[in-house]
Amino acid sequence: DVVMTQSPLSLPVTLGQPASISCRSSQSLVHSDGNTYLNWFQQRPGQSPRRLIYTVSNRDSGVPDRFSGSGSGTDFTLKISRVEAEDVGVYYCMQNTHGLTFGGGTKVEIK
Amino acid sequence: QVQLVESGGGVVQPGGSLRLSCAASGFTFRYYGMNWVRQAPGKGLEWVAFIRYDGSYNYYADSVKGRFTVSRDNSKSTLYLQMNSLRAEDTAVYYCAREWGAAYWGQGTLVTVSS
C-alpha cells in the first residue's frame, strides 16, 4: 500500500501570512495514463471534508485562488498565499493512483 | 447542486450488523463510481470501499474485506454499505463520496460499536 506522510502535524500561522503543507508518498504517484492523482482536502471543524485541489495543481470550483498545489513524483505541497480565519481546519492529501490512501492530516490554526 | 445524504448509523453491539445508505441527487448517479470513507473520533480519514458506476466492480480496504459489502441501486440513486461482524474499531463517522477522486462528500453518519 502507498503510505502518505504529511508534515507538519500542526501549523500555527498568522493571519495574512503564507502557509505551506508537505505531503510525501512512499512511491511515485505517476499513473500509467500519465496523470498524477494527488488531491488535497480541507476539513473545517465540525464539517465534512471538501476537495480543494485535484491532480496536483487543479483547483476545484469555488476554491479561492490563494490555495495552490504543486509537486511531482513523490513530493507535493499545498500552499495558502495569505491565510484567512476561515482556513482553520485539518488538511489532508490523498492519492488515488495506486488504490486510495490519505495522509494523516495537518492542523492549521491561527497564532 | 450535488447532494449526498447518508443515513442508517447508530449504536450496535460487537458482532452485529448495520446497513448504511447514501441518497444522491443533483447529478446523474448512474454515471459515477462511489466511495465510502470513514473517520474514527478525533482521527484522520480512512478509505473503506469503492463501487464502479454500474456496480460491476467493488474494491475494499483490507480492514473491512469479507465483512463489509458495498452495493448500489441506480434506479433509486442510492449507495449502500452492509456492515457485518462489526468491531469496536469500526466506530466512526461514515461518509459517502462521489467518484474515485472523492470530489463531493455527504455530511456523514455516525456508527458506534459498543456493548
Image: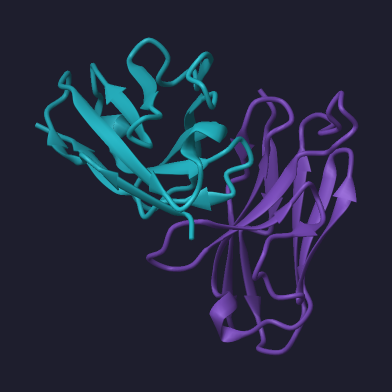
Q: Position of residue B46 (x, y in %)?
A: 49, 37
Q: Is residue A74 left or right of residue A42?
A: right
Quarter of the rendering containing residue A28: top right
Is any atom of residue B87 visible in this view? yes
Q: Position of residue A71 (x, y in %)?
A: 88, 51
Residue at point 41% right, 63% down?
Answer: A47
Is any atom of residue B32 visible in this view? no
Chain that the image shows in purple: A
Residue at point 76% right, 39% down?
Answer: A37
Residue at point 71% right, 89% down?
Answer: A16
The colour with which the image depicts chain B is: cyan
Q: Is residue A56 above or below residue A12?
A: above
Quarter of the rendering containing residue B7: top left
Q: Is residue A104 above or below residue A99?
A: below
Q: Nearer the viewer, residue A80 or B24?
A: B24
Q: Nearer the viewer, residue B71 or A21?
A: B71
Q: Is residue B73 left or right of residue B26?
A: left
